[in-house]
Amino acid sequence: MALDHIQLRKRYAKFWKERAHHESPPIPLVPQNDPTTLFTGSGMQQFVPYLLGEPHPLGTRVYNIQRCIRAQDIEEVGDNRHDSFFEDTDAIAIWQETFKKIGMDARLNERIFEYDAKKNWWSRAGIPSNMPPGEPGGPDSEVFYEFTEVPHNKKFGPKCHPNCDCGRFLEIGNNVFMQYKKNTDGSFSELPKLNVDFGGGLERLVMAAEDNPDMFATHLYQPIIIEIEAITKKSYADDTNKAAMRIISDHLKASVFLIKDGVLPSNKEQGYVLRRLLRRLTVKMRNLLGALPSAIDIALISRQILKMYEDIYFDLSTDEELVKRVIEEEIRKFGLSLERGMREIEKMEKVSGKDAFNLYQSYGFPLEVTEEILLDKGKEVNKTQFYEEFQKHKDLSRSSSAVKFKGGLADHSDQVLKYHTATHLLHQALFDLFGNDIRQEGSNITGERLRFDFYSTKNISQDDKAKIAALINEKIGEALPMRFKIMPKDEAVKTGAKSFFREKYPDNVKVYYIGGTDDHPETAYSKEFCGGPHVTNTKEIGSLSIYKLEKIGSNLYRIYAK
């Protein structure tokens, strides 16, 4: 019998622990202090600062099991394997030796295949020419599983091969030789710390373990699919229903995880991705049901997701009500305009990109929702024209998946380091002025400004902006040194170091201190868990001005400063 996902997690952890690796806990789906990407899109994301030279508190051998969201994969969901994840002769020799140990002769172009940088180079930005300055990357060695019963589809080429997209071969893992950093002149230099990174998708490993070429027929999706079948009275075995059921199950799973990590539907950034997911699955459910899905329908399907990952990511007693409430409200809002929008589409003989954008503005139809409604009616939309209209509205263009959702390297420019350090001062200033119930809810830093979200039971007024800024600038003027210390987590907590409550931390952590001395870091003004990097002295910040303070929810506030 194949391993279930819980057993697979345990076996994966055991493998690395036996090889002297320490577990680095997963980071939230919404990464902190990375302005260039909306979501955590790979397990490697949290390690980028360490590849660039920062010391990791757990040493040089670490592993993690990281939940990820890839917004750029949304439109690919519906096939059997997608869900919302230089030549190297040394790797070839190692693989040949590995196969030899089990009595197999692994010749080139039989079990080992060579590809160019388009296929065998990894960086978060893709091929070397697409990498921005400062981005790490390197050659990789991908591992594929072959589903022998899947016939080759010649529309993907005359011959099948491991990197063919016909579905016969599935990439289940990738060894990346993180060796290079791109320079400002386009050349490459070696990273301060060379690294071999193995990455493998849990869902795809399960497909291989079950020898099942359909991810949505594995135990990670079957309970969800079965619930959808029960509600819609439609069969997944019917090919006309497959794509819709895959989209519903994938998008709802991603939505449940996002809501758990504090994302709410909105028209900007992470909230817009969640809104797209929920509205697209609502249209698919409507198509299967012939009517809008009810809150009870979605709650029943969501419950299967919560149960599947209970005690790993979810607490059913608290999370079920939160998920139900957020999804119910979004579907209710969308449902009011969906029928009217569809009547407008019925009137149109031809739908232009401008028409599609008007549907987005007037009825809240994301582009892919409009496309799918039109597809069922044999119509198409001009996507280029849609994005041209989108670009004309700057307040909405920040949410375009054509612009921002591709991600990239976290910005480590001098200005970002200044703002990053300033958030530590801001965090401590809020404690000093408003008491110990202050709780950081998130932050976002770009080269132009910092944004800091926090919880407070005390009312924070517009008059308080000046008080907060004055205290921060006072500490900047004191020219306090910035230093870090790696220590056991329990010891760090005892010293009063603050942490981000949504994030899990390893047994050893890095604590950054502002002020104090090397011998007595406990006398520091600010003590906070953080991976870095920062400026070396607060005087480098210069000054900080708070230009906006707004209330964004019950006891929730947002500060913008520069």
Image (cartoon, rainbow, N blue to C red):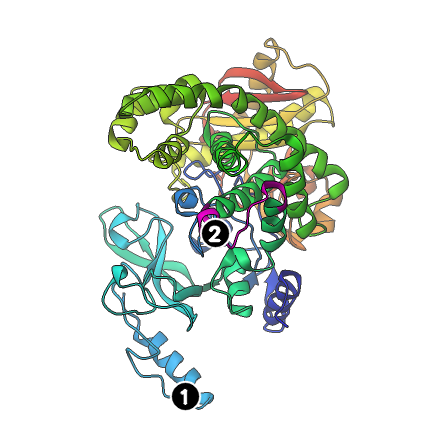
Residue at image x 43%, y 34%? 416
Mark sitting earlier along the chain (1/2): 2
Q: Position of residue 297 (x, y in %)?
A: 64, 36
**Depicted 341 relative to depicted 221: above or below:** above
Q: Please identify the quadrant where the C terminus is shown.
A: top left
Kind of residue sitting beneath label 2 = Ser
Taking depth in this image into account, of 58 and 69 the one nearest to the observer is 69
Q: Which residue is mark 2?
A: 42
**Depicted 502 relative to depicted 396: above or below:** below
Secondary structure at numbered mark 1: loop
Residue at image x 53%, y 39%? 30
Residue at image x 47%, y 24%? 267
Q: Position of residue 172 (x, y in %)?
A: 46, 64
The quadrant in which residue 322 appears is top right
Residue closest to the far top: 463
Q: Please identify the quadrant where the N terminus is shown.
A: bottom right
The quadrant in which residue 72 appears is top left
Left or right of residue 103: residue 433: right
Read off the magenta span.
230-243
Q: Position of residue 391 (x, y in %)?
A: 30, 24
Kind of residue sitting beneath label 1 = Met
Q: Position of residue 440 (x, y in %)?
A: 63, 31
Taking depth in this image into account, of 471 and 261 the one nearest to the observer is 261
* Mark 1 surroundings within 10 Å by alpha-carbon count, few (fewer than 14), some (14 through 19), many (20 or more): few
Q: Which mark is residue 104?
A: 1
Taking depth in this image into account, of 468 and 180 the one nearest to the observer is 180
Secondary structure at numbered mark 2: loop
* For discs 1 and 2, the disc positioned in front in the rendered view: 1
